[in-house]
Amino acid sequence: MKKLFTKDKNSSFGDLLRLFKEDQIGLALVGVVNIESGMISARTERFNQATQDYTAAFRECDNCSSEEENRLFFVNCRKCGKSEDNYFWIPSGDGDGIYPVFELNHVNESNGEVETFGFAVVLFPTEDFVEPIVEHVLKNASEVESSLMAVSFSPGLLDPQSALEAFEVTSLKGSKDGQTVFFSDAMTTVDSNNVIFNMMLQNTDDITVLAFSEFYQAVYQGPKPRIIIGYSTNWLKEKGFKASKPRPSSQAVYDDWTIFGMANCHMNPMCNEAIWLNFKINEVMEKFNYAGSWLLQGALYGDSDCLKEIDRYQEYTSDPEWVTTWLGQRMQFQAAIDHEDGRLTFPFSPSNSNAIKFDRKSTVPFEDKCTILGQFWYEFRDEEGEMSDFIKSQDVGLPLAWFISTGVVKSLELGEEFINETFQAFLDVLQLEESEIVGLNSLTALLEKVESKSQGD
Ligand SMILES: [Zn+2]
């Protein structure tokens, strides 16, 4: 008898976990990444024709940004070569936090080597989720013989019965030597205090990237993991695994992926916590160069825990060349140059701090600026009071923010400049630093912050 309604076989997250298990493919926690802007990106190395440079994967590009207006997931740029083949971004939550990054690896039976054919990133907006995973790993490390075993993670927290369905984000082009994938906040650039996590993949074929979430019509409102998985395209084909959902392109589905189920979120940038966890994870794996390099990055930005702990890494840091090299590995290119030229000396100190600039780009997303300023203008434009001078002085930026946030007009580059300047002026009047309000996306939340600050909180 003909079956009329059969579910696509091998399309859910539970199915994929089962297939991984069959082929003894394990998830191993290798690090964490902090996201602040509501967008995570993954990118592979790409050779830049224009500059004859491979490192351009993370260099700033004057011609493009990390996202294109009204376009989901991709950026096409001729100048730096960004395309669907090597780059994607995806909404990662409302407020963001620290997300664990896993290698998907297996042991090659012919030579006994561990090979990595894919990655997984779990997007979950609370520290509570990440902490037990990391603690589990750190605890295991003292109990098992091989430190590498300690970071293997049996996905108990990720339900093997999971019915989450996937859509395919993209297919990252393979490379004959394998390749490095970088994960970061999409707005993060080099020389930022955010984590840029990189992972070496050994497979040479394309990587199919799948994103899992619950169905749009689900009513469950609690936080639920969003998972991005990239794995060998050939292997997925061979196993008959196929995404069952179309890639979302409409605003409604996009909003669902962005916000639905995203509850608690942090209010402060999580870069220091993320750096610290990466240090711990690498130390447990006895990857001391990597462990030391995370301390180096933390120390560069004045994190007191890292400044203290890095004393134990004297045997590494006493070699100036090591410091320069590993600043570079952590994408602190300017600091590496400054260190090499003697403008920055180790140990880092506040007197060096002019060499350190914080990443201002990954702070308040543009849409949130428009929302906040727009709400402010709409509610207070006719009020007399201490803010009326400010409102008069910003008679372009404020109404513009309102029109952009309500969708009446589209933002152009010039408009963005106005909004950014107005937003900065707004913060100055309220005596707020942008870093203090990351994660706040409404006027009410912002005014509460002003209130709590004035009460000495
Ligand atoms: Zn570009």
Image: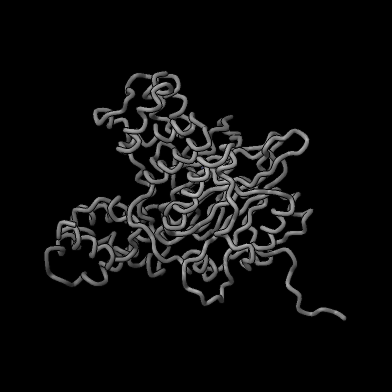
Task: Return the x and y of residue 370 as percentages of the image width and height.
Answer: 34, 62
Residue 416 location in percent, x, y? 37, 54
* Residue 388 picture quarter: bottom left
Counting from the top left corner in percent of width and height, residue 268 is at: 33, 53
Q: Nearer the viewer, residue 409 or 305?
A: 305
Q: Residue 126 is drawn in which quadrant?
A: bottom left
Q: Position of residue 61 (x, y in %)?
A: 48, 40
Color encoding of the figure? one colour
Viewport quadrant of the C terminus: bottom left
The residue lying furthest to the front in this view is 143
Q: Residue at x 69, y 35 (%)?
A: 113
Residue depicted at 29% across the width and 56% down the height: 437
Task: Say whether residue 82 is visible.
Answer: no
Q: Nearer the viewer, residue 156 or 380?
A: 156
Return the residue nearer the eye: 408 or 14.
14
Asked if residue 346 lies left or right of residue 426, the reply is: right
Q: Is residue 386 left or right of residue 272?
A: left
User: Residue at image x 56%, y 43%?
Assistant: 150
